[in-house]
Amino acid sequence: MLLSVALVSAALPSAVFAEDLTEGTAAAGDETLSPEERARRVESLASSGADAYRSGDFEGAIRAFKEGYRLEPVPNLLYNIAKSYEKLEKYADAVDYYQRFVVAPEVDSSARQAALDRIESLREIAQLKSQQNESDAKGETGAPDKTTPVKPTEDEPSNVAAYATLGGSVALLGGGLALGYLASGEADTARDGATYEIRSDAQGSAKTYALIADGMFVAAAAAAGIGVYLLLSDSDSDTKAKADASAASRTVISPWVTTRSAGLGMSLDF
């Protein structure tokens, strides 16, 4: 029996799915076919598969080619099945059938080499598609690319400590002015009081207010100096600014009052 089944052309179009090939199992009635009838049936199925392939019905082409191979294991049908799977972009199935074609007996050497070339190409395509899918998945989830280093965010210089110290100096100055005003009022009472007791009490209060006001003026001047220093240091160096801010945060201002005097103390920890 001479059976000829052509390889489908690689230049034909693309698309979908197919059932597994069942070899060596004849459908009901196939065992009664004569060799000539079986050959005609296989050629008819091969022709139908080629027509389906040309029209873009790759699923139908696979069914026809597999049915023909079930009736007669012609190697060229394996090649045609592989080409149909390739058009459906089912590269794993295509590679499987190309491999079966390559090891089949009585395969022309040029056709065998063409199948080997397709196997290599399809494996490369499958690998590229896998890498592309992984890249797309990373993009959708927002995951950072491990190969791209993330530049660390640099801390910006901060003038908070400088402004806070200058604000404190303004508050101390305001407090000193207020106490100075009270001291002035008490001094007037000490001079014009109706009785000696009133004048004496007013004189003591005036001295206390005056001493505290003087201390606050001194503290305000010191705080203003520190604030200006920190402000200038921040513009020079971020590291120096942090050190100066730390020193400013350890500035302690504390008032003191005794029976004869009062004042405002300030300690700096450098």
Image: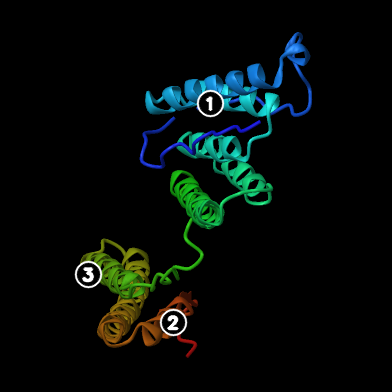
Describe the element under mark 1 as helix, strand or loop: helix
Earlier in the chain: of badge 2 and badge 1, it is 1
Q: Quadrant of the N terminus?
A: top right
State the image coordinates of residue 207 (x, y, percent, origin top left). 33, 76
The residue that mark 3 highlights is 184
Q: Amino acid at mark 3?
A: Ser
Q: Residue at x 71, y 16 (%)?
A: 34
Q: Is residue 80 left or right of residue 56?
A: right
Q: Is residue 77 left or right of residue 100?
A: left
Q: Amino acid at mark 2?
A: Gly
Q: Is residue 68 left or right of residue 190?
A: right
Which one is in front, 49 or 187?
Answer: 49
Which numbered dot is residue 46? 1
The residue that mark 2 highlights is 265
Which numbered dot is residue 262? none
Describe the element under mark 3 as helix, strand or loop: helix
Structural crowding at the residue carrying mark 1, measured as other residues with C-alpha within 10 Å and reported as few (<14), some (14–19) or many (≥20):
many
Among the 4 quarters of the image, the one containing residue 28? top right
- Residue 182, relative to residue 214: is it above or below? above
Q: Residue at x 45, y 76 (%)?
A: 249
Among the 4 quarters of the image, the one containing residue 251? bottom left
Q: CA distance from mark 2 to mark 3?
A: 23 Å
**Colour scheme of the rendered structure:** rainbow
Which one is in front, 135 or 254?
Answer: 135
